[in-house]
Every structure is written in C-alpha cells, then in structure tokens.
Amino acid sequence: MYRLIYNDLLEWKKKSNRKPLLMQGARQVGKTYVLKEFGKKEYSDLAYFNFEEDKELSQLFKQSLKPTVLIDSLSLYRGKKIEKNSCLIFFDEIQIEPAVLTSLKYFCEEAKDYHVVSAGSLLGVSIGKTSSFPVGKVNFIDLFPMNFHEFLIASDNEMLAEHLQNKNDYLQLAEPVHEKLLSLYKMFLYLGGMPEVIHSYLNAKDPVQVEEIKNEILLSYERDFSKYTTPADSIKISNLWDSIPVQLTKENKKFRYKEVSKNGRASTYILSIEWLKKAGLINISYNIKVPRLPLAGYQDRSKFKLFLLDTGILCVKLNISSKIIVTGDNLFSEYNGAFIENYVASELTSLFKPPLHYWTSKSDAEVDFIINSDNHIIPLEVKSGYGKRIKSLRSYAEKYSPKKMFRTSPRNFMQDNDFCNIPLYAIGFIKNIIQQR
C-alpha cells in the first residue's frame, strides 16, 4: 500500500549530503514494508538484514565496525556482493544489536557511497539506553500509522484524496460526496491506521479477521512492556496504558495520575509515559498558558492529555465491536468524543512535529488543539456532533484576536467571516486549506 512517506525517502536518496537513515515508529506501522518497497523499486539490489529473525547476524558486528570489513562480511553472508550506490542496505530491528546503531557513524564518515537505511520497533527506547548513539551522523524519519489520506488511496478513492489534497478554500462539497467521505471516515475510525488491518479488511471484508489482527497487534505491544523493561516498570506501564482509554472517555480528558492508581503521582509514572512515548504508542498534547511562539516555550508540562497512537487500537481497548460501522452516528455521540479527538490527534501528529498543544482559560473554556503552521498560530476546536456552539473559540478570540478560528466536525466545509469549519475527514489536509487566511 502506498505511503506518503515514500516521497521523503526519494528526497533522502537524492541528497548530496545523505547520511544513513533511521526510521522510527511503533511496531506494526509498516516500517519494514515501506523500506523494502523503496529498495526494490528505487535500487537494482536490496540487501536486507533482520537482526530479530537472524540472531547470527550480530556476530558480524562483534569483530569490526569498519564499513569495508562489514561490507565484505555482509556480502559473503548473503552470497552476493553489495555494490556502491546501486544497492540499498537495510538493517531491520536494530534495537536487538546496539553495535549496528554505532556502525552507522562509520558508514556516514567512511562509506558515503553506500546507501544505508535502518529501522527498529522500539528504536526510540533503545536510543535512550545506549551511550554510543551516532549523534549528527544519521538522518531521522518517523513513520506513523496510516492516516485518512493514505486510507483513501488504499481503498481506491484516489480521486477523493486528490481533491482534498488540492482544496484550498471553504466551498462546500456536493452533499453526496460529503456523505461518502463521512462514511469512509467512520470506517477508518473503526479500522484505524495499521496497514495489516486495512489490507485485511479491504481484501476480505471480514470483521472477525480484523478483530483478530487488532488484538494480535495490541498483544504484541503489551508483550513489549515486559520484554524491554523490568517487572516493576512493566506493571506501571501496563497500568498507565490501560487507564488512557478510560480517561479519554471522560468529559475532561486531562490526564490524571490518580486514575491510574489511588495514590498515583507524577514521580511514579512519569518514566512510564516517557517509555510509551519513545515506543511510539502514545501522542501527548500539552496545555499552553498563552498561544505564543514557540508553543513549547509556553507549555505547562504538568497538564497534558494522552492519546493512543491509533483509533483502531482504541476500539480494541474499549471493546467496540464491528457493528459500530453500520449504526449511524454512534461514534459521534458516545464516549464523549474520545475517538474523534484521538483521531484528530493522530492526524495532526503525522502533519506537524510533536508534541501537540491545547489551550484552557482560567474559567471553563478549552480549545482542543493549538497548531503552529508556518509560524501562524491556529486555534482548532473538535466537535464530535453537529452542534453549532463555539463558546470556547469565542472566548479564545476575545483574548487573542486570531485572524481565523477553526472547528472540525461532521459538518461540510463552511466559512463565516473569521470562523471556518473543516469536515473531520479533511483534517489531515488542513495545511493546504488554511493557506487561505
């Protein structure tokens, strides 16, 4: 399935100052697939080495990390010479062997004619534990679950995707088109963005199979808690992980440690949050005191919301069955908008550099997301239903006088002076749309 990140990989290949590439992302988001496809399509040869599947590979990195030695050893190991420029070397699951990560420094310094990419399911966690990380010697790229744009392409709705991609106004779509996109969007909320889940459903249309795959992915995440941490830390991470969906269903979605355990506090769980963040399993949105740039300079790190990386995983955690697909607007009205806000958080994370931000007043006003787009601060309110009230946005406008205010909801495109509505299915295209300021 096509991934938008492919264009970034093409740009990386063309760079004159190209460095070895590290692709980060949670387990099952498609790192191996997209890098293999890139190697097969853009190079005459792909040299693929998986350190989780083939334990003997690590031995090649015990003797020497000098690229000339490694290239010879890897060529002999695979039984085919690795050529400069024309072959893509792909080191997969490199968190298994820290020496592979270290070797990237020497590939950068001594073997620039070799194209090297690498990936790891828990690379963010592993990087935090090694003292030999090749600082400044690698290019980074992050892969997230598939977004709605990619889902449209995968489901043979490329024309709809192209139309939204090129849209830079607030003119309403024809009602049948709007309804079709809403229907596809609801399906995506349930399926989520895991490539295997989407591929399975589009090919077999079997909800039972979809549920099995999502549960297997969830189980693989939870197994990692114990596999890569101590028993005590594993329990803390698991308890915190389990509390996130429940907290999202509350009207006030601000994360509360006491919802994890009776005597929960930051000192107990802050490292658990950091582990989940580095593993790519959560997205964080920090409260900001005032909407000024840089947003990170005004964030209150003691007040935040935690979202799961994917709405499909959220469905599993909340035991939502496949019948939700055919029961109208249930997802828009139930669970206090948990799915909707989680979806928007995922889409914005794939568009803008994390973390996310939201704003609250001293009273009861809250704007769900504050976006920095090309050094313009954009207030965005999320509505799960068709209500027209924008009390919080108006409260924000009275204080900060933004040029435009934005709401995303199931409603069609609309503009009324300084207020604009963007349909939920189009939030992943907001960068182009808000250019019309």
Image (cartoon, grey):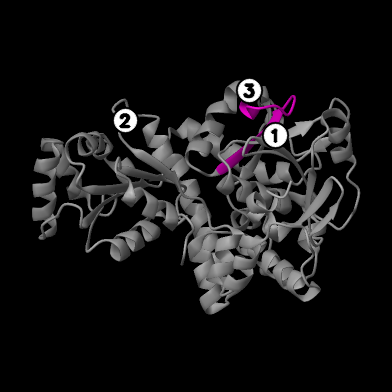
Is residue 215 visible in this depiction of the protein?
yes
Q: Residue at 51% x, 50% y: name it.
A: 144
Instruction: Kindly identify which residue carries mark 1.
Output: 255
Work out how far the residue at label 3 is from the one at label 2, CA to CA, in angstroms. Answer: 27 Å
Mark number, residue 414 = none
Label drawn at residue 133: 2
Q: Nearer the viewer, residue 161 or 332?
A: 161
Corner quadrant of residue 273: top right
Foreground residue, 66 or 161?
Answer: 161
Coordinates of residue 171 in the picture (x, y in percent)? 78, 62
Q: Amino acid at mark 1?
A: Phe
Mark 1 or mark 2: whose residue is earlier in sequence: 2
Quadrant in the picture for residue 94: top left
- Tell me residue 22's x, y (percent): 36, 43
Nearer mark to the viewer, of 1 and 2: 2
Q: Which residue is mark 3?
A: 297
| Residue at position x 78%, y 72% in the image | 174
Secondary structure under tag 1 reads loop
Asked whether 289 falls inside the magenta stretch, the response is yes
Q: Residues within 10 Å of mark 3 (few under 14, many from 20)?
A: few
Which kind of residue does numbered mark 3 sit on? Gly
Q: Residue 295's spot in the image, x, y percent?
A: 65, 29
